[in-house]
Amino acid sequence: MKFDSIIWDWNGTLLNDLEIAIDSINHLLADRNLTLLTVNQYLDVFTFPVRDYYEKIGFDLKNEPFEIPAFQFITIYNKAVETCGLHYEVIPLLSRLRDGGYRQFILSAMEQEQLEKTVNDNGIDHFFEDLFGLDNHYATSKVENGKSLIRKRDLNPERTLMVGDTIHDFEVARAMGCNCVLVAKGHQSKERLLSSGAEVVDSLEEINFF
């Protein structure tokens, strides 16, 4: 095996939540008489930290604290995510990797309790050795949590693969010293992902794990 451990991003990579993320932010934009986002526009502007993304799409964070729209967004999103499923290829792939002896983890910018709930609600918690989310709802950076995961679980970075859907996942993988593959079916466009220099595929099925 080239790798013995897989670190998965959650939103967009395993969880197919693009549509509800756009719907949720458009609720907030409509309330402020700001221009709504199309799918393509969203894929071209979404970024981490999400505070920067909010500013790009028109939120006036000098006059409205970021915490207000961030809380409103997560309230709408968390209700909608209960109806959200996984990408179709996720469960068969997780099963193959488990049967192949891989250690699997999730490293997410989602708040820890919500991460645990959504993973459990989708019936896949048994595939993962551990879930690493944030201690807040502000989706800042996963770098420190990623380094903590490597250290606490005694992973060899050279034999660990990070799979994500954003340039931030590539940045996190580099900070951890891990390999990385980005999947162009989540929250950023394929063109943006390719611009990072990362390996990019169109679906999880294209990744050469074995």
Image (spheres, helix red, strand yellow):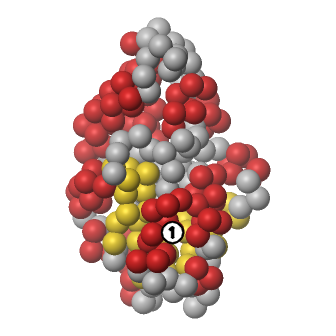
Q: Position of residue 7 (x, y in %)?
A: 48, 70
Q: Nearer the viewer, residue 81 or 154?
A: 154
Tally of numbered discs: 1
Q: Where is residue 104 in the image (x, y as percent from the top left)?
A: 42, 76
Q: Nearer the viewer, residue 61 or 34?
A: 61
The quarter in which the N terminus is drawn is bottom right
Residue at (57, 74) in percent of width and height: 161
Residue at (45, 69) in percent of width and height: 148
> Is 128 situated left or right of 6 in this image?
left
Mark 1, residue position: 147
> Is 122 situated left or right of 137 in this image?
left
Q: Which of 45 and 146 is in front in this view?
A: 146
In the picture shown, does residue 51 fall above or below 126?
A: above
Q: Do we see residue 206 in this rendering? A: no
Q: Position of residue 35 (x, y in %)?
A: 54, 15
In the picture shown, does residue 140 fall above or below 66?
A: below
Give the amino acid type for the residue marked by disc 1 in the picture: Lys
Residue at (42, 89) in percent of width and height: 101
Q: In which quarter of the image is residue 122?
A: bottom left
